[in-house]
Amino acid sequence: MAIAGGVYYLGIEGALFGPIILCCLLIGIRMYNETMATTLLSNYDQLSLSLKNIKECFSRSISFQSAMTINDID
């Protein structure tokens, strides 16, 4: 199909340039998809680490508040 499309748009030279253009397009799409997948994965890892830190801080503050409440009662 790339050969036929190349010949249709560019004439006889299109038989060579059509497949080359198609390959470049497919490589560009694959690079974009891999870059986006890597970026989203690293953002997800950073988000999970920050949520983990927030959870640890929250649990420490709860345990600190519990300790203060227990000491206040005694």
Image (cartoon, rainbow, N blue to C red):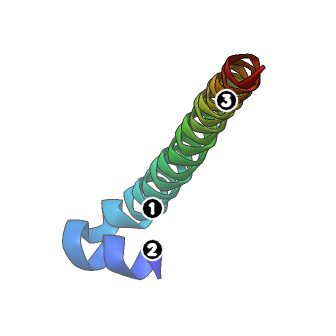
3 or 1: mark nearer the eye: 3
Q: Label 2's element? A: helix
Tell me which amino acid carries mark 1: Leu
The C terminus sits in image quarter: top right
Number of on-image labels? 3
Tell me which amino acid carries mark 2: Ala
Q: Quick check: 17 above or below 72?
A: below
Q: Please tell me in which quadrant of the rendered image residue 53 appears.
A: top right
Q: Earlier in the sequence, mark 3 or mark 1?
A: 1
- Which residue corresponds to the image point at 42% horizontal and 55% vertical from the top-left? 25
Q: Residues within 10 Å of mark 1 (few under 14, many from 20)?
A: some
- Measuring from the top left, give residue 73's x and y in whole percent: 71, 25
Where is mark 3, residue-wise? 49
Q: Which mark is residue 22?
A: 1
2 or 1: mark nearer the eye: 1
- Measuring from the top left, give residue 67's x and y in whole percent: 75, 21
Which of the pair 34/41 is nearer the observer?
41
Tell me which amino acid carries mark 3: Leu
- In space, the residues marked 3 and 1 are separated at their CA atoms by 41 Å
- Which residue corresponds to the image point at 71% horizontal and 29% vertical from the top-left? 66
- In space, the residues marked 3 and 2 are separated at their CA atoms by 46 Å
Where is mark 2, residue-wise? 2
Q: Quick check: 46 above or below 5?
A: above
- Which residue corresponds to the image point at 40% horizontal and 81% vertical from the top-left? 4
Labels 2 & 1 near each other (Cβ < 8 A): yes
